[in-house]
Image (cartoon, rainbow, N blue to C red):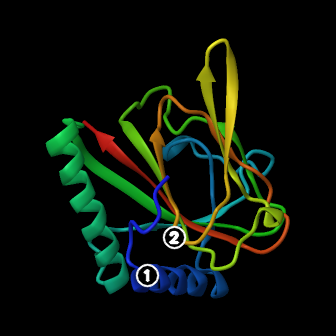
Amino acid sequence: MIVNFFEADHLENLHCQIQSLYDNDALKKAAIGKHFDEHIKTEIRGDYIQWINESSDITVVQQFFQVINHFVDYLNRTCFMGILHKEFHYAVYPKGRFYKRHLDTFDNDQRRKLSMVLYLNKIWTPKNGGDLVVYTQDYPQERAISVVPKFGRLVIFESSVLEHEVKPVVEGVRLSITGWLKVR
């Protein structure tokens, strides 16, 4: 978990961008699965998304990818991660919405190496719900780490190792950018 990864004015601009998309019904219902095997299953996942394209001409999106690319360069140079691709989307969870426990990889595609979530909701407290719960294997038992989605907080974890879920939003609208750093 990292705070201050993005500058305050950049976070503000990202918040305005996602809020505008949500206010103007520009997001689509999120699905589970991949490509031709996607299904909308509201009993599993209830968020709304819009994919973010790195070649976008929107300044705030370009700035977002500049920061991400700098981070990827650092990871590849210092940790030899081999990250070649990335995919990100805006994600909005209105009141009552959630995402059941899952991994961020697919049976036939293990390229997602790191999962990232950047929180963009301005005012959020534990009573709002929508926590990210990450499950770890602390032998001999499992442990759950709960992350409150506070503005500007960035969470990074291994996509194929750590199961996680988004608890139901109780109050407000949970805003974030979610994405994956991918290897070949």
Label 2 residue SS: loop
| Residue 114 drawn at (x, y percent) | 40, 42
Residues under numbered marks 1 and 2 in contact, where contact means CB atoms less than 8 Å apart: yes
Could one spot residue 56 in this view of the protein?
yes
Measured in 3D between alpha carbons, the distance from the residue under mark 1 to the one under mark 2, in whole angstroms, is 8 Å
Tell me the residue at 42%/69% (across/down): 4
Q: Is mark 1 on a helix, strand or loop?
A: helix
Q: Is residue 67 placed above or below 40 in the rendered structure? A: below
- Front residue of 154 and 51: 154
Residue 101 horizontal side relative to residue 89, left or right = right
Name, please, the residue furthest toward the top: 140
Label 1 vs 2, first from the N-terminus:
1
Front-lying residue, 115 or 2: 2
- Please provide percent x and percent y for residue 76: 19, 43
Residue 113: image quadrant is top left
Task: Name the kind of residue labelled 2 in the image.
Answer: Gly
What's the residue at 50%, 32% (across, down)?
Answer: 106
Which residue position holds label 2? 152
Is any atom of residue 82 visible in this view?
Answer: no
Other-residue count near label 2 (Cα within 10 Å), few / some / many at <14 / 14–19 / ≥20 = many
Is 171 on the left or on the right of 100, as rendered? right
Give the percent coordinates (x, y) of residue 74.
Answer: 20, 51
In the drawing, what numbered circle is on residue 8?
1
Q: Against 18, is 20 above or below?
A: below
Q: How crowded is mark 1: few (under 14 residues within 10 Å), some or many (20 or more)?
A: few
Left or right for 29, reference 67: right
122 w.r.t. 73: above or below = below
